[in-house]
Image: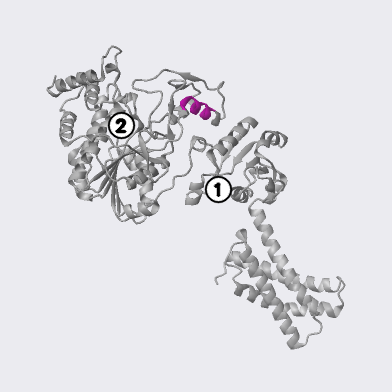
Amino acid sequence: MRINWRNAVALGHDLVAAGVAWALAFLLRYNFELEPDHAEALASNLLWIVPMQAALLLWSGMYRGLWRYASLIDLRRIVAAALGGALVIALVVWLFQRPSVPRSTVVLYPILLTMIMGGTRLAYRAWKEGHLSRLTNEGRRVIVIGAGAAAANLLKNLGRSPEWNFVGLLDDAPAKRGREIQGVKVVGRLDDLPRIADDKDVQLAVIAMPGASHAARRRAVALCQEAGIAAMTVPSYEDLVSGKVTVSQLRRIELDDLLGRDPVTLDSDGLNAWLQGRVVLVTGAGGSIGSELCRQILKFAPQRLVALEANELALYTLEQELGERADATELAYVIGDVKNARRIDEVLALHRPSAIFHAAAYKHVPLMENENAWEAVQNNTLGTWRVADAAVRHRVEKMVMVSTDKAVNPTNVMGASKRLAELVCQALSTDRTRFVMVRFGNVLGSTGSVIPKFRRQIAAGGPVTVTHPEIRRYFMSIPEAAQLVLQAGLMGKGGEILVLDMGEPVKIADLARDLIRLSGLTESDVKIVFTGLRPGEKLYEELLADDETTLPTPHPKLRVMKADAVPGMAWVAETVRWLETPHTVAAGDARAGLAARIPEYRPAELESADATSRSERIAAAAQFDRANAHGG
């Protein structure tokens, strides 16, 4: 083994330790009163014991590790070398009949040597890791909520730092009360937090319950707010298991921690069979859902993942991220607009995907309602048609279209354009190319969503603007949405609209209040202002996720809409002719054209109180459409 200067110092220390252990063994045997012949025996034997012990220490591999990370493996090596030395000493004493060496010293020597060598290594590690500084009780005073494995790992990893002074743990399990983890005592139940925080002058609480329900985490956050102390949390259970982060990487509490739901159970075997070794195309790959779909798809090792995106910066950002985790999957980054039929045809001809996940869309409701109404129809419906038509011509096995809850009884152009896209895909679905549509509500933290806007407003000092006190929306996390889209794509047989279980709707005003509190502020610091509903906005979103309109599937978080009449190809051809109108269509005419094709669409100008019947409104919309088709 090669000896560097650190190993040389360690070896020198251990040789001194061997000499000290041998001398102490003699001193203890004779009660620290050595006769001249005993002292001579001690010194003469030391001349060959130290070199012998050095050889055994080198042979045992003692100097392969670092003192700072001394462990049980090093202790075993110390014990083995010490016992080996004792055996050699005993053998030499027996063979050469050295009566001046008492038998008790042969027994004491390995014990003392192990204590000296192990003790100094333990002290050095404690010093380097800051455990000795904990004795001074310096650092931020922290209480840990939860006394399980996550808390134990947290204390082990952060307890060495002088910046943290852990004053106790809280857990509701009676069996843990009064016990200690890494020297920190379980001092009470969660409900005791306000009292204990005051008694122990706590400055920070760390929620170490990664596997707990979101209701339990919400309760812990509420108790921290009641106690008037800041709160942080360990990473989620999924992130810890995946190895992306460690338990010591604390972060602030996010809305996902309070509003999230139970983890999604995926049919991993089925998804592996479907995606592994295949070519998969994702449109809108730079968006919130599209980029997460790319991340999730990579887990199933496709042969090639083709990321199609119109926004150069979004695609570049995705390339920088995915390039580090692609492993054996080939990645292709393609700039392209889904409305560009030639480009879509080129991409499918070149890459020959067997599955397409269509996530490209305009989704901001007020922005798409008036001046940009026709662009929404073009991107969301014509773009879907371009991709779907190319998928049929290039014999793609399955295309999964990401839809929205706003397509249910739509009152805005965005929702109506997505509903029309659903109908187009349903009409095109065959056994050769199957189309599956997936509906879900709002996604926490997605681009353009309300959460980033609220954060910016809070950072600016307010006010936080909410359109209406009673407005409610469904929310799920981006990873959950993407996972369920994959699951729906696997389960879909063709032509279905699958609806994700979004749980219970959440008041947007309550979201605003939660974010204000999580920012360490109160409503007296940051006001909430109600601005009124925007064009095309509903108070309540509908998902059609009830027993009357949907049917259960084998997956508990997915339901399938009951089948309606599917439009024929003549209807598709006529719709495509309208979508390919060579000039920009006015917003009112665009809404009228949508209403002519979507009976459940209710644009504001067609909802006058004196309208006599729905059929008359549709007839009026058809008249608008015919006029527009002739350039009127």
- What secondary structure do most residues of the magenta stretch adopt? helix
Span shown in magenta: 507-516
- Relative to residue 525, is residue 417 drawn left or right? left
Q: How many marks?
A: 2
Taking the magenta stretch, the answer to whether it contains residue 468 is no
Percent of width and height locating residue 206: 60, 41
- Relative to residue 148, is residue 567 drawn left or right? left
Q: Is residue 104 above or below residue 280?
A: below
Please give the name of the residue rendered at 24% of the width and 24% of the height, measured from the top-left corner.
595
Residue type at mark 1: give it. Val
Residue type at mark 2: give it. Tyr
Image mark for residue 475: none
Please give the name of the residue rendered at 38% of the width and 23% of the height, measured from the top-left corner.
538
Q: Is residue 8 above or below residue 492?
A: below
Label 1 CA crowd tier, 10 Å (few <14, some 14–19, many 20+)? many
Q: Which residue is mark 1?
A: 247
Which of the image's four quarters has the C terminus? top left
Q: Which of pointers 1 and 2 lies earlier in the amino acid sequence? A: 1
Q: Which residue is mark 2?
A: 362
- The quadrant in which residue 273 appears is bottom left
Label 2 CA crowd tier, 10 Å (few <14, some 14–19, many 20+)? some
Which of the image's four quarters has the N terminus? bottom right
* Residue situated in front as seen by the camera: 245 or 422: 422
* Residue situated in front as seen by the camera: 113 or 293: 293
Taking the magenta stretch, the answer to whether it contains residue 508 is yes
Percent of width and height locating residue 576: 17, 32
* Residue situated in front as seen by the camera: 233 or 53: 233
Percent of width and height locating residue 265: 44, 47
What element does badge 2 sit on?
Answer: loop
Q: Residue furthest top?
A: 610
What element does badge 1 sit on?
Answer: loop
